[in-house]
Image: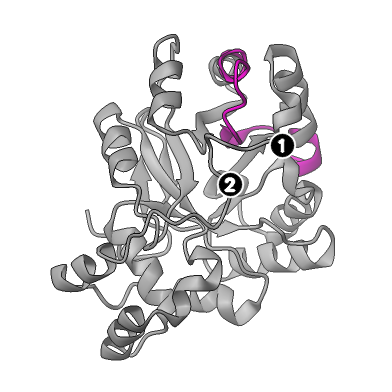
Amino acid sequence: MTITHLQDTVTLNNGVKMPQLGLGVWKAKDGEETYAAVKHAIQHGYRAIDTAAAYKNEESVGKAIKDSGVPREELFITTKVWNADHGYDATIRAFETSLEKLGLEYLDLYLIHWPVKDKYKDTWKALERLYSDGKVRAIGVCNFNIHHLEDLLGEAKTVPAVNQSEFHPYLTQEPLREFCKSKGIHFEGWSPLGNGKLLDNASIQEIAKKYNKTAAQVILRWHLQNDAITIPKSVTPSRIEENVAIFDFELTAEDMNTINSLNKDERTGPDPDNFNF
């Protein structure tokens, strides 16, 4: 399906519809910076907002949602349980804290932020409970590699709806994306612009020139055409608008291949098999 509008959605494995493009607020400062970015994004048509307990800006996200004037049911709000809160009881408590900070009665998507060894299965059971209790519309994971997913699926009653992982032209994650697809798990990319490293890439700049677009717009378009959900982060009003002006052009198969071929398996963030936080 071709995404032609900012509010177009993908259908998750439980039938819930999720916007394919949203605003990420990682590293956005709590207070006015996050509040203004989220409010501006919603006013300019964004309907998905992605935060996390670890970002420490859930209260500002919640205030912007409340003040946006857009009905709650039209928005899709994601947050994540942090590593220190793994385990069944701690996860339930962490969820309630996030919900309270956001000022919401339910969440659209709740994710395990990192696969903390020997703990994520108990955490997943808590997410399954929250899901069956109707407190969250969909549950998923972040930064799970294939072996983490296989391990989880061995015991899970509910297949994760989403796996959010680092994804950009220098880290195309093809085996992971194929695995997710085979299990009905929708792939979502974080750090879509490779922490800005990709904006100077000559091949991408050449393609951008052809369409009279920016390098960022070409990369985000590439995400959509790879069927990935994407959540570019920005607190700059003009960038928030620029990042979604990507529905009036389509990359050719040749362009897609050129960008796909830039893969170096190069991460800008931590390796899910080797993190210590």
Q: Secondary structure at mark 2?
A: loop
Instruction: Report which quarter residue 136 is drawn in.
Output: top right
Horizontal side of residue 140 vs 110, given as left or right: left
In percent of the image, x 24 and y 73: which residue is there? 250
In the image, the segment drawn in magenta is: 99-126
Label 2 with label 1: CB-CB less than 8 Å? yes
Q: Residues within 10 Å of mark 2 (few under 14, many from 20)?
A: few
In percent of the image, x 51 and y 32: which residue is there? 141
In percent of the image, x 50 and y 31: which residue is there? 140
What separation in Å lies between label 2 and label 1 (alpha carbons)? 10 Å
- Amino acid type, mark 2: Pro
The residue where tag 1 is placed is 277
- Amino acid type, mark 1: Phe
The image's colour scheme reads one colour
Q: Secondary structure at mark 1?
A: loop
The residue where tag 2 is placed is 270
